Amino acid sequence: MPEMPPDEVRNAVHAIVARVQADFEAELAKLEAQHEKTLQETRDEISRDIREKVRSELEASAAADLAARVDAARLESDREAEASLERMRRELEEASEAALAKALAEESTRAATELEAERARVQRERASEREQFATEIESEQVVVRALTKELEHVRAALAAAEQAKNEAEQAKDAAERSKNEEAVASARASERQEQLAILESLLSGVRVISSARSLSDTLTALTTAAGTLAPRAAVFIVNGRELQGWRAAGFTSGAPETLRLPNDRDGLLGTASATVSVVSTANQPAPAFASLGSDRAGLAVPVTVGGQSVAVLYADAGVTGEVEAPASWPEGMQILAAHTSACLSHITALRTTQAMRASSVASGRPAPSAEEDSSARRYARLLVSEIKLYNESAVRLGREKRDLLNRLGPEIERARRLYEERVSPAIAARASYFQEELVHTLADGDRELLGSA
């Protein structure tokens, strides 16, 4: 039930308080009259001193009685006001519920009537639209049939004209065919020679890559082979968040092999590395070091091992000379990169197998054989070679500063843990192959270049 508005409640309370105050004032006037009468009688009977004392006592008694009566009257007024408010609230609730029920019933009846009328109107409109649509469809079908017949006549006329044209062209072609056959044969022979030269370069590059026996030699062979097919080529090593330049061919400026580029998806090389897919300059801008014009194509091809990018091959059409269209080198770059990936995977798998074979010696077995000893040495060489391959700039700077151990500390410790986990403790105790490889491969045979950790 909705409550009474605050103004109405306040007015009702004020009315009750006014009535109580009027009763209180009337009672007070009556009491004052009685008190005056009593005082007057007493004043005549006793002396001034006794009269003053009695007056004080009477005044105190009257004040107490008056306060008690006022409190009683106020309490009674509050009770009457609460009872009145509760009665008015119940009456308002009953009236509101009745009015609401009546309004809802009327609104429901009205809505049902309007809904029924709307349904009837919509049905009439839909029936009218269907009839109109059927009439329009029939008219369109008539027009389509007429257009179809006209189109058949036009096609027949065009066929006759085309036949006449073909006959004329055949006669002309027959006259020119003999003239062009010699030129076509000459062009095909020249094209055949160019294709054979491209295939020979590609085959030679595949052979050089296949003959490499280390990871670094394989990537170097890839750069050389790519440079024989494309005007310019460069190989970048994936080193964590960086792409480190390795080798380049055909560049007269820029020196890509000295660059360190971010390995992210914002660039052509980073996108190819992250997505392990071929990316061209049609989808990403060429790298800044290439200074490639908008009319020349560039390509980035990932080199993978185990499904992960370990290097990126970049090639483009160069900045000088005529643009070959269509160019054959993009397909060659993909073939070389795919073959390099297979070779790197084979070398890695072979060396890992050899190293793991060396680590299979369990505690308590006889002393390791010469083959197991050699396998441990090869595994140490593999681990240190990978450090050198993926950190070439740091290795070069470490040799100059004679602080290789300090500069490459995390990489060396990680490789050392792998060596100790996979190589038999007996072999590790007999020969410090890992330390020897650090000196031989990383420090180029000069122990002083390692520095102190």
Image (tube, rainbow, N blue to C red):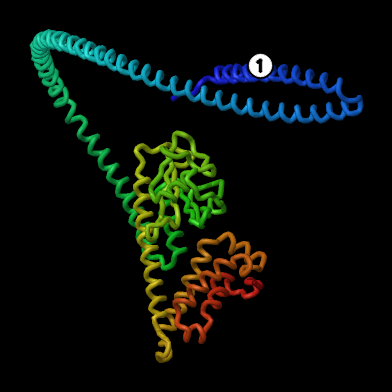
Q: At numbered mark 1, what does the secondary structure look like: helix, strand or loop?
A: helix
The image quarter containing residue 97 is top left
Question: How many marks do you count on the picture?
Answer: 1
- For the C terminus, the image quarter is bottom right
Left/right placement of residue 165 relative to residue 42 reads left
Q: Is residue 120 above or below residue 94?
A: above
**In the figure, 322 relative to 79: above or below?**
below
Viewer-nearest residue: 408 or 6:
6
What is the quadrant of the N terminus in the image?
top left
Q: Indicate left or right for 191 with 166 as reference.
A: right
Quarter-wise, where is residue 392 in the image?
A: bottom right
How far across and down, in percent of the image, does residue 60 sit?
79, 30
Image: 124 above or below 170: above
Label 1, on which residue? Answer: 22
Q: Nearer the viewer, residue 369 or 189?
A: 369
Q: Residue furthest front?
A: 45
Q: Residue 145: x and y, percent? A: 9, 11
Residue found at x 61% / y 18%: 14
Percent of width and height locating residue 363? 43, 87
Q: Is residue 275 visible?
A: yes
Within 10 Å of disc 1 (Cα), the crowding (few <14, some 14-19, many 20+) is few
Q: Nearer the viewer, residue 76 or 338?
A: 76
Horizontally, residue 111 falls left or right of residue 178, namely right
Residue appearing at x 86%, y 23% in the figure: 45
Residue 232 image point, x, y percent = 46, 47
Residue type beneath disc 1: Ala
Residue at the spot 47% in from the left edge and 48% down from the top edge: 270
In the figure, 98 relative to 307: above or below? above
Residue 143 seen in render = no
* Depth order, front residue of 27/98: 27
